[in-house]
Image (cartoon, helix red, strand yellow):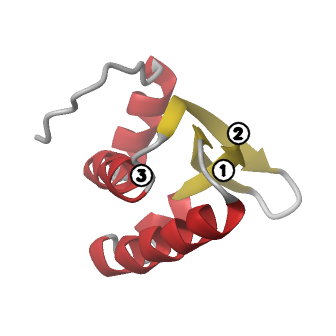
Amino acid sequence: MPIFKEKFYIPDEIIEQSDKWGIKEYLITAINLVKKYFPSYHDLNFSLQRDYEIDDEWVTIDVSIDGDIEEVLDSYDKYIENLVYEIPWPERDKIRLSYNIT
């Protein structure tokens, strides 16, 4: 289990649903990738999202990032490249990132 330098709260419903979907370890991997590729992140939050039209659900990692647009986009490309490498399909489809540049 990874050690996090900062404290943040993952709601019980996120942990329970992640466990149900079998993605809890992959959620931790995704969080570690956020921390690695967006070192100026803050306000890390989590939510369950649902698209009723296609009957799909996922966990969203919502993060605010300090930095300029080009730097953040470059970091996002690296995040996605490593996410694809470290988390198999279809599990990675259950974890999505939403970011806000501040």
> What is the spatial separation of the Cα atoms under label 1 and label 2, in whole angstroms?
13 Å
Amino acid type, residue under disc 3 in the picture: Val
**Which residue position holds label 3?**
34
Residue indicated by mark 2: 102
> In terms of depth relative to the viewer, which is nearer, 54 or 74?
74
Q: In this image, 46 relative to 82: left or right?
A: right
Q: Secondary structure at mark 2?
A: loop
Residue 98 numbered tag:
1
Q: Is residue 9 positioned above or below 71 on the image?
A: above
Above or below, 85 against 57 in this view is below
Badge 2: residue crowd in 10 Å (few <14, some 14–19, many ≥20): few
Q: Amino acid at mark 2?
A: Thr
The quarter of the rendered structure image containing the C terminus is: top right
Percent position of residue 83, x then y: 39, 70
Locate residue 7, reporting x and y percent. Answer: 32, 19
Task: Please determine whether, in this image, residue 47 is positioned above or below residue 18.
Answer: above
Q: Which mark is residue 87?
A: none
- The residue type indicated by label 1 comes to Ser
